[in-house]
Image (cartoon, rainbow, N blue to C red):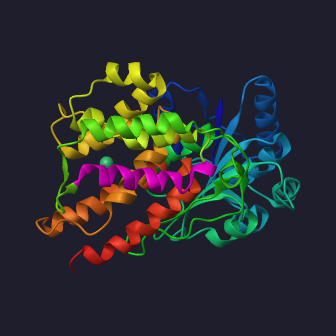
Amino acid sequence: MTIYIHGFGSSGQGGKAIQLREYFKSINEPFIAPSLSYVPELAVATLEELIDSYEKEKVTLIGSSLGGYYTIYLAEKYGVKAVLINPAIESSKTLKRAVDLKGVAKNYYDGSSFSWNASHLEMLKGYAVSEVKCGEYLLLLQKGDDILDYKEAVAKIPNAMMVIEEGGTHPFEGVERHFEKIRTFFALNGTMVNRHLGKLGTDGFSLVLFGTKVSDSKEFCKMVNQESITKAWFFASKVHKEQLYPGDKLPYLTHLGNVMMEVMSVQHSIENAELAIVCAILHDTIEDTMVSYSELEKEFGEAVAKGVMALSKDETLSTKSEQMLDSLERIVQEPKAVWVVKMADRVANLGKPPHYWKASKVKAYQDEARLILEKLGLANRLMAERLAEKIEQYKKYIGT
Ligand code: NI
């Protein structure tokens, strides 16, 4: 159950509540956005009662503005995952302004007023968290927030996964662009540790920082069966035999080896490294050769066949961008090992573009790479870092 906690003067019928409700409905996940009392103690009591009632179910929280403040308190109390959208960190200070304005605040739902006074500020202080320890956080921040300073949130929860965007406003413009990221964050296992990806592109709208999972940095002592890898390599050598890599006229196997090496360079951080390596070798067999899904399934098993299938474009879709979005949607249904292959494939393809590519195509290719990172980056920090770096370097091929 995901609970959305609205901000000051807002309600469960506010803009973000409505957007989130629709999104969670579309993915068939339980969601509730209760309309809370403006009295802090009543609001928190309602939320605690609600969370307690889902005792056996996993609860996740999303809080915006003042709702973000309550969310931190509750995430620490219950040790749950939480997404904070331009959250209030020092709410008793921020909302002192409302007391100063004659103690009357507006309810955005119907335009009515409510009294907001010093006793409410005292109540807020009761929910202050001195140090975050138990919750796991994804921060969505916009620097253009004119009410709250995003830096306070970064300072409060430096270990969080973060998306920090240039511009924007306090309500967070275009928050729906991050709904899938929220879903991925809730689905990830493992504890976040303090490790940031660094910035992605200085030319774009958003500056994205990823946190990472402990499991990304720990060594997975997984057995990789070398026989399976060798078998895949010979299989690919045979079926791609006549194919050349566009541009350089090198054997296509050069590309497959390149993607495989990228995957192997981070294999210690992949939960099923063998699946990733085998899928890397076979990733273009369905798309580019006569090999069928059932043949792959027979030779390499269901997980590999499904992985390669997801990595293959559906060429019946009319545009390239539809094909890419469709493939990404299918990839995220597969284990994280398959996500890594898609990122590695793009890393391998972000070398010098073929001379016959127009400038617009080169730019579109970089944009597409950003989309891949955006959708799949959370699966593996090391590969996400590598892809971010390649995207940055690719700039030199884009004419000014
Ligand atoms: Ni490829």
Q: Which of 309 and 45 lies nearest the eye of the viewer? A: 309
Q: Is residue 303 above or below residue 264?
A: above
Is residue 264 one of those drawn in magenta?
yes
Q: Is residue 288 above or below residue 111?
A: above
Report which quarter residue 393 is drawn in.
bottom left
Is residue 261 one of those drawn in magenta?
yes
Residue 78 in view here: yes
Horizontal side of 348 relative to 130 (left or right) equals left
- Which residue lies at the image location 48% right of the left edge and 43% below the top edge? 277
Q: Which of 87 and 320 lies nearest the eye of the viewer? A: 320
- Image spot of residue 22 (x, y percent): 46, 33
Horizontal side of 254 relative to 112 (left or right) equals left
Position of the N terminus, as image quadrant, is top right
- The majority secondary structure of the magenta stretch comes to helix
Q: Residue furthest bottom?
A: 400
Residues rendered magenta in the picture: 251-269
Q: Which of 4 and 117 lies nearest the eye of the viewer? A: 4
- Which residue lies at the image location 85% right of the left edge and 44% below the top edge? 77
Q: Which of 39 and 34 lies nearest the eye of the viewer? A: 34
Residue 115 in view here: no
Q: Is residue 388 above or below residue 69?
A: below
- Image spot of residue 335 (x, y percent): 53, 35
- Which residue lies at the image location 64% right of the left edge and 38% below the top edge? 223
- Image spot of residue 6 (x, y percent): 63, 46
- Image spot of residue 398 (x, y percent): 24, 74
- Which residue lies at the image location 44% right of the left edge and 48% below the top edge? 375
